[in-house]
Amino acid sequence: MKTKKFSKKPKDLKERVGTKPVVCYPNENVNDNLKILLEARKHLKKIDEIIIPPRDARTFIVKSNNFFRIESLEGPQVGDLNLFQADNLDEKFYSGKTRALYGTHISVGDKMFSSFPYFRSLATITWDTLDWYGYDEDGGSVHDVIGTRCDPYTSKLISGKDYHYCCHSNLTRALIKEKNLNKNDAEKIVHDVLNVFMLTGFTNDTKQYFMKSSPVRPGDFLEFFAETDLLGVLSACPGGDCGSEHSSDVAKCYPLKVSIWSVEKKYLDGIEFSKVSSYNRDHGLVD
Ligand SMILES: [Zn+2]
């Protein structure tokens, strides 16, 4: 950990420290279609809904140009979301690069990018009833792309116990059921999630990942616009509101709801559609 220092400070310390931070990936040129989407969302019609039972996961399909919402139902509950291109499970949500583009927590106007070599927006966030929260005094916020997903391997490392209803396992079981995959194939494509409603950050002193009770309440939702046909998988985390512990049966857990919404085509006029990256994939190789 960086708080433990083994090496001496150099003599030319002043020349090496104190430079100004530069944003690595300025995102102003990434079209978010937001003006059109904020108008279109006023005309949504619900076409389907799926309930995610506590400590379990379910899949759902969203066609391109439809919207979907993840909603809190009976009590504060965190959800772990995986997204795939519905016809090609190799194209899946890329949490790391989404974080590099938009920061540790995402909200309205931010896009969920897919893995290389596809690297396009799978979905844009169009509404967030928790955006009033912003960042608190500990640097905490909701909907993070820093926390991977709770899993039985890290749990075993830390507690020595086997627990089978972590989000990683819930997502794996749901994928096996939806796609008729074997356990190995399903587990390998489960990926780092969007932690919906989860309140997290990094501690000021050690920069360790922390969580606090989620401020989400029944009726709150996070809404997305699908930019290609999507297969979503959502787990209702065994941590419940993630205010105490996860990877166990201790926390009180509630169901989550996913609803799918359509909108007449005319409301999407002018939308710039997301395309697979046009990088030619030469990688500097000589024929
Ligand atoms: Zn979890």
Image (spheres, helix red, strand yellow):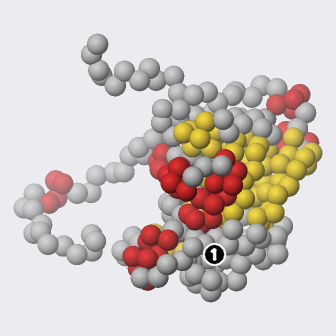
* Residue located 56% across and 63% down the image: 168
Closest to the observer, 120 or 249: 249
How far across and down, in percent of the image, does residue 172 sit? 59, 59
Farthest residue, direction top: 287
Position in image of residue 76 (x %, y %)? 73, 75
- Give the side of residue 13 with respect to residue 271, left or right: left
Q: Is residue 221 above or below residue 25?
A: below
Query: Residue at 72% of width from left, 59% of height from top?
Result: 58
Q: Number of marks in the image?
A: 1
Quadrant in which the N terminus appears? bottom left
In percent of the image, x 63 and y 83: which residue is there? 249
Residue sitting at 53 percent across and 27 percent down?
Answer: 277
Q: Secondary structure at mark 1?
A: loop
Question: Could you tell me which quadrant the C terminus lies in?
Answer: top left
> Where is 227 relative to 181, above or below?
above
Can you see residue 203? Answer: no
Ligand 1 under 8 Å from disc 1 Cβ: yes
Q: Position of residue 177 (x, y in %)?
A: 69, 55
The residue wearing badge 1 is: 238
Q: At which x and y percent is residue 206? A: 36, 74
Badge 1 density bin: few <14, some 14–19, many ≥20, Cα 10 Å: many
Query: Which corner quadrant of the image does residue 193 belong to?
Result: bottom right
Nearer-the-camera pick, 12 or 125: 125
Q: Is residue 64 above or below residue 74?
A: above
Q: Is residue 243 visible?
A: yes
Q: Amino acid at mark 1?
A: Pro
Residue at the bottom extreme of this rendering: 250
- In the picture provided, is 210 more to the left or to the right than 53? left
